[in-house]
Image (cartoon, rainbow, N blue to C red):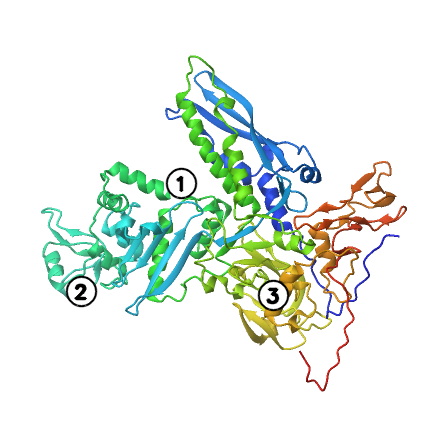
Amino acid sequence: MLKRPPNRVSFRGREEIIDLPNLIEIQVKSFRQFFQEDKLPHERENMGLEEVFREIFPIKSYDEKTVLEYLSYTLGVPKYSPDECIRRGITYNVTLKVKFRLTDETGIKEEEVYMGTIPKMTDPGTFIINGAERVIVSQLHRSPGVSFEQMKHSKGNILYSFRIIPYRGSWLEASFDINDLIYVYVDRKKRRRKVLATSFIRTLGYSSDSDIIEEFFNTFRAKMKSDKDFPKLVGKILAEDILDENTGVIFGKAGEKLTTAMLKRMLDSGITALRIAEDADETSPIIKMLAKDPTDSYESALKDFYRKIRPGEPATLSNARSTIMRLFFDPKRYNLGRVGRYKLNRKLNRETTDEELEVVTLRKEDIVDALKYLIKLKEGNEDTHTDDIDHLGNRRVRSVGELIQNQCRIGLARMEKIIKERMNLFDFSSDTLTPGKLVSAKGLAGVLKDFFGRSQLSQFMDQTNPIAELTHKRRLSSLGPGGLNRERAGFEVRDVHSSHYGRICPIETPEGPNIGLITSLSSFAKINEFGFIESPYRIVRDGVVTEEIEYMTADQEEKSVIAQASAILDEHNMFEEPIVWARYRGEPLKIESEKVTHMDVSSKQLVSVVTGLIPFLEHDDANRALMGSNMQRQAVPLLKTDAPLVGTGLERRTARDSGAVLIAEEDGIVDYVDGFQIVIAPKSNRMNKKTYYLKKFMRSNAGTSINQTPLCNVGDEVTAGDVLADGPATDKGEVALGKNVLVAFMPWCGYNYE
């Protein structure tokens, strides 16, 4: 008979409403989206490897007579199984062949070119590189988009600033100075090269002062019939230049403050209407900047900007124009990414439709709207607020697929230069050009080999026991290329944040220099299409807790009032108490139950899988729990395993998702069993037997033994999902790290406690 784990008795108040998601989904799903292996070439979406090829190609020669276009790619089949690759000490990979179309003077040629190999992920979410199992750790980094910040000047003034951070390209920053003028900086490294904001706006096409005033203020036309109208106009700001059309004499410039003398001169010259900027005065930052701005037109602003960005080079108009286009408006050099556009539009209260999210370069409206928001922030507008950079709404996860995609982009960009060189140097008189002669496989393969072998995020898998393996795949690191530096990371970045609730475990992190920089995903957390971590909640409607589940990011959660999972419900799924404990914007509070909008799905959703394996966690000191979480990963598999008598309900699921145990893929009857294989005859088709091979005494990365032992006998009926064989540190399909011990506790009047 099939040895199944004992039925555990749950002392929880109520049953869990939702199952744990696949615990290695963060790895597997991300890689699947990158490879799109299960789709036909013409069905592939514009993401992952497909996206990189579409970005780089077509490649044109300098004279544009030769064009190389990308058509599609096909992936081969691995030569050996993962186990065989480990045995032989080779890499588990697939071949990549790409179909190109070349158009030149001689005509059109299509050819499939071999472009090397790409390591393929195994089912348990690992890579086998030179016979060793490795894991690509997901990176937690600052999200592209716009963020508004404030800092205190030494004189006590608060200076507001914003940063537009692209996925790739130059950073754009703008900041108030002590005199309430806004300066724009391009790229942090060149801080000294600052440009006045109005001067920068002119380079975007708002050339005259009146254009800028029209953009930043509401304007209206004021009539002036006699000197009786003077009092209501004196002190107002002009929104346009006022000049005598006959003589060309200027009475007042846009941005100037009206005086009685000016108005009298205008009236005497027959001017009876003026355009006035509403709500503008001399203290408005825009008006102050216009008064100080050394430029007065599109051309002069472009040249001024170019002189500051490229000092020492001749500031011609064409150079200046192409520089600003390259910096912010060329998709090859500047890319906000879908994420950056999504964050930018959300912050500036714009639509986030699919068409909008495809606009990956900056637009002049983005910069102008960000400046308007900055000015409102300075004026204390209550609809505006600064951003907390440690909030999980402003940090996102780069998973495996995205990290490999970025490496492929580097490899193909290098290849692009080589292809262009070959196109120009090719002698058409002596030979015919084919795609195979242009494309070399070295560029891409070399970059990938380097990434898998040397990157800080490509790590030798911790394989001491199944839990160590699982945790390694669910780890989030703030270190690595484009991330933080452990020497410079401050206290705030490492600290537990209220937005971590249900997303990042507040307990499981290493002690030592990496504390808080290396964290673990919470048990129910998922990662959405933009890379933000989501946590599930039950929806509460009119005081009734429904079975509906909603996944929310840290940003979306800000508007919700969330009750805790332990809140007591009656038989109608309504809160028993009129006042319940909940949290709003990360702060705990007692609130009327009818105001609650959501409820936690489980009391385990706060912590990671390993921390969730600790029974009675709430009675432990946080520091001891942290050590307990880390020390479970160091338990060496025992020869005779012993499942825990007191568990938390995560033991079975952890063993399954870690890949330690062997699981039946479909219903059937066990036909044959020995120490090396299990043969199952499916119920649907008895003749089409499936053989499962057991891992026997393989060496793990940690030098421990990986050995699977069958749990079934011939004739046993099995259903899909049943555990067929135990692995290291498991007992009847449950994680079993240690031994159950009998402890006698003899208190002496309570004095020998601890």
- Which class describes the residues within 10 Å of circle 1: few (<14), some (14-19), or many (20+)? some
At a point 23% along the width and 42% down the height, the residue shown is 312
Disc 1 to disc 2, C-alpha distance:
49 Å
Disc 3 to disc 2, C-alpha distance:
69 Å
Camera-nearest residue between 679 and 528: 679
Q: Residue tagged by mark 3?
A: 626
How many discs appear? 3
Image-based side of 297 in relation to 574, left or right: left
Label pair 1/2, CB-CB below 8 angstroms: no
Where residue 483 appears, as percent x and y from the top left, is 47, 52
Instruction: State the SS at label 1.
Output: loop
Q: Nearer the viewer, mark 3 or mark 2?
A: 3
Q: Residue furthest top?
A: 430
Q: Amino acid at mark 3?
A: Leu
Instruction: State the SS at label 3.
Output: helix
- 3 or 2: tag closer to the N-terminus: 2
Q: Residue tagged by mark 1?
A: 333
Residue 548 in view of the camera: no
Label pair 3/1, CB-CB below 8 angstroms: no
Q: Residue tagged by mark 2?
A: 234
Q: Nearer the viewer, mark 3 or mark 1?
A: 3
Camera-nearest residue between 332 and 523: 523
Where residue 340 appears, as percent x and y from the top left, is 46, 50
Where residue 266 appears, as percent x and y from the top left, is 12, 56
Q: Is residue 550 above or below residue 104?
A: below
